[in-house]
Image (cartoon, grey):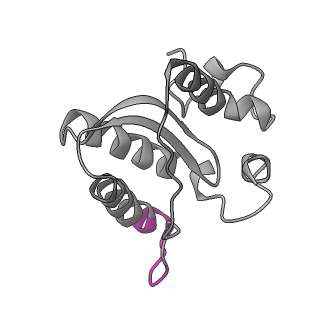
Amino acid sequence: MDRELDAAATGPRWLQDERVAQVVADALRYGEAQLSLYKLRAWVLMVNHVHILIYPNAALPRITKAIKNYSARQSNLILGRTGSPFWQDESYDHWVRGPEELDKIVRYVEQNPVAAGLVSRAEGWRWSSAFAS
C-alpha cells in the first residue's frame, strides 16, 4: 500500500500544487514552532499523502486536528473546493521502539520521493526535511 501511495496511483494529487504544498509545510512547521505540539524529526509531502515523524508534546488527536484543520481550510480556499473533506479521516500512527527503528523510519520518510521516482536524491525534494536549501 505504501508503494502504491508513493507512486500516486490513487487518490487526489492536490499536494502537487505548490501553493497547497506550501500551506501544508507551513502548518507542520507552525505546529512545532508556534504551538509546541511536537518536535519534527522527519517529514515529506508526496503528491497524495504526507509522512511525519515527530516527538509529540500533546495527544495525537490534538496534533492531527491542528495540522489537518488549518491546512484543509487553506488548501480548499486555494483549490476552490467546498463541501468535501480535503484529508481522509483516518491516519496511521506507529510508536518508534528504538534508535535503529528511528533511523530506518527517517530514511524511509526522506527517501519516499526517490522511491517514487520524483527525484534522484532525497536532498532534491523541496517538500521534505531532507531538502538541501
Residue drawn 45% across the image and 84% down it: 83
Would residue 30 appear left or right of 34 to someone viewing this image?
Answer: right
Total numbered badges shown on the rendered structure = 0
Residue 79 inside the magenta-drawn segment: yes
Query: For the point 45% across and 80% down, which residue is it?
Result: 82
Q: Is residue 87 visible in this depiction of the protein?
A: yes
Image position of 57 with respect to 78: above or below: above
At which x and y percent is residue 54?
A: 39, 35
Q: Is residue 39 left or right of residue 114?
A: left
* Residue at left offset 56%, top offset 29%: 126
Which sits in the foreground, 114 or 133?
114
Residue 20: give x, y in percent of width and height: 49, 52
- The correct choice, above or below, for 30 with respect to 82 in the image is above
Residue 27 belongs to the span the image colors magenta:
no
Relative side of 89 to 108, left or right = left
Q: Quadrant of the N terminus?
A: bottom right
> What's the magenta region?
76-84
**Nearer to the camera, 26 or 2:** 2
